[in-house]
Image (cartoon, grey):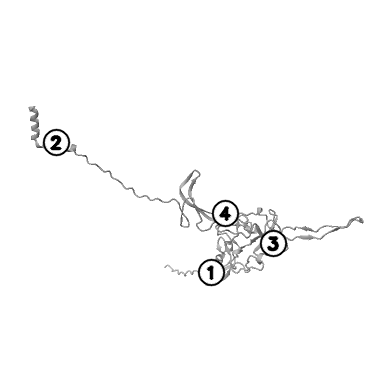
Amino acid sequence: MVRVLFLLSAVLAVPGVLAMVQRQDAKSTSPRPTTTPMTTTPEPTTTTPSGCMGQDGQFHAPGSSYHPTGDKCYTCHCDFGFVNWFDWSSTVSENCHYTDCACPPCVDDVIPPDQCCPTCPNGHNCNAMGTVIPAGRDVQVNGYTCRCPDTSGFPFGRRKRSTVDRRGLRYFSPVFGDCTRFLEATCYRPTTVPPTTTVPTTVPTTTTPTTTEPITTIPPSICVTDNGVYNPGQTWHPNGDPCHTCTCEFNSWQSTAQEMCYYADCACPSCVDEVIDPGQCCPRCPNGDNCNAMGTVIPAGRDVQVNGQTCRCPSTSDYPFGRRKRSVRRGLRYFSPIFGDCDQYLEATCDRPTTVPSTTTVRQL
């Protein structure tokens, strides 16, 4: 007991030890400070709407269809992109196309509002010498019996309704050409065979002569055009243009005669003073091959002095003269679809001769 009291008094006598013990007790009994976790604010995300920016400048939702130019035959779709048959892209894109229209089996076709392809409000018909007649029966026109071709046999191809090759309300087949030529009726003029009388070999008192009824024969099909009526095999020049030739040809497939027309091709002439003789299509050079040299016509094949320069025409064998249809002829000038205006190849090449100064030889001593 005495020992315990002694130790206690010793501890209390030392101030530093007592203060340290008090701090330890305070530290052990004081509450721990709380730590607040840091919070981060997420950056704002921008959501891009899924769709297509169309050619019309408007935004279109996936799966929608629209006409960006207002043409009902030109349609665009906002679709998901195609990767392969087993994978479709998650992105959308604009895909546009033209609608194909069949050539209508009538000459008075119309296109309803908000529609692309034409319809025949008056039924199937065709043209017969300027008169519209219904299909499926014979119609008398100007003394001829006319009938429209069978619509089931129309070789009406299909074409894109592009405004580039569309001609009004007429349509075009890339295989058979202008479909309107298949809307021409087949017309013929019936011929009457005079009646024949059969006289019996024996003349019984009760027998009278027999008379056959008039026989109407149908001649082969003919071509009825604005320039006249022609038989198969005949050829003519519409409007008197010798470069525009038409032929009446028999179409065995349709068993009808049809008008077939074409333009004659002419080579570009190898002269600048070419002429076209009356009744002829292509030009000729009455003065031979020549060209232009600074406003002067000079003959080809030799050098000619013009305004102090030596000029020569290009070789006609080197002329890149293509052939072109006379439908684009400009006066008497011609045009090559490959090389352009042929007149540029009728310009002479001119050179000014150079004078070499005389040289003086100095004799060496």
Residue pointed to by mark 2: 21
- Is 171 left or right of 70, judged from the image as shown? right
Earlier sequence position, callout 4 versus callout 3: 4
Q: Please determine whether, in this image, residue 266 is positioned above or below residue 25.
A: below
Tell me if residue 228 can be seen: yes
Looking at numbered disc 2 in the image, what kind of residue is underneath it? Val
**Residues at marks 2 and 1, CA–CA distance in whole angstroms:** 128 Å
Earlier sequence position, callout 4 versus callout 2: 2
Earlier sequence position, callout 1 versus callout 4: 4
- The quadrant of the rendering that contains the N terminus is top left
Residue pointed to by mark 3: 224
- Is 192 left or right of 228, judged from the image as shown? right
Earlier sequence position, callout 2 versus callout 1: 2
Local crowd at mark 4 within 10 Å, few (<14), some, or many (≥20)? Answer: some
Residue pointed to by mark 1: 310
Q: In what element is the residue under mark 3?
A: strand
**Marks 3 & 2, CB-CB < 8 Å contact:** no
Indicate the position of residue 25 as horizontal and vertical percent values: 16, 36
Q: Residue furthest bottom?
A: 307
Residue pointed to by mark 4: 100
Indicate the position of residue 298 as horizontal and vertical percent values: 57, 69
**Marks 2 & 1, CB-CB < 8 Å contact:** no
Q: In what element is the residue under mark 4?
A: strand
Using the rendered view, name the quadrant where residue 172 is placed.
bottom right
Earlier sequence position, callout 3 versus callout 1: 3
**Residues at marks 1 and 4, CA–CA distance in whole angstroms:** 61 Å
Indicate the position of residue 41 as horizontal and vertical percent values: 32, 48
Identified at 57% across, 54% down, the residue is: 100
Earlier sequence position, callout 3 versus callout 2: 2
Q: In what element is the residue under mark 1?
A: strand
Instruction: Name the mark nearer the viewer: 2 or 1.
Output: 2
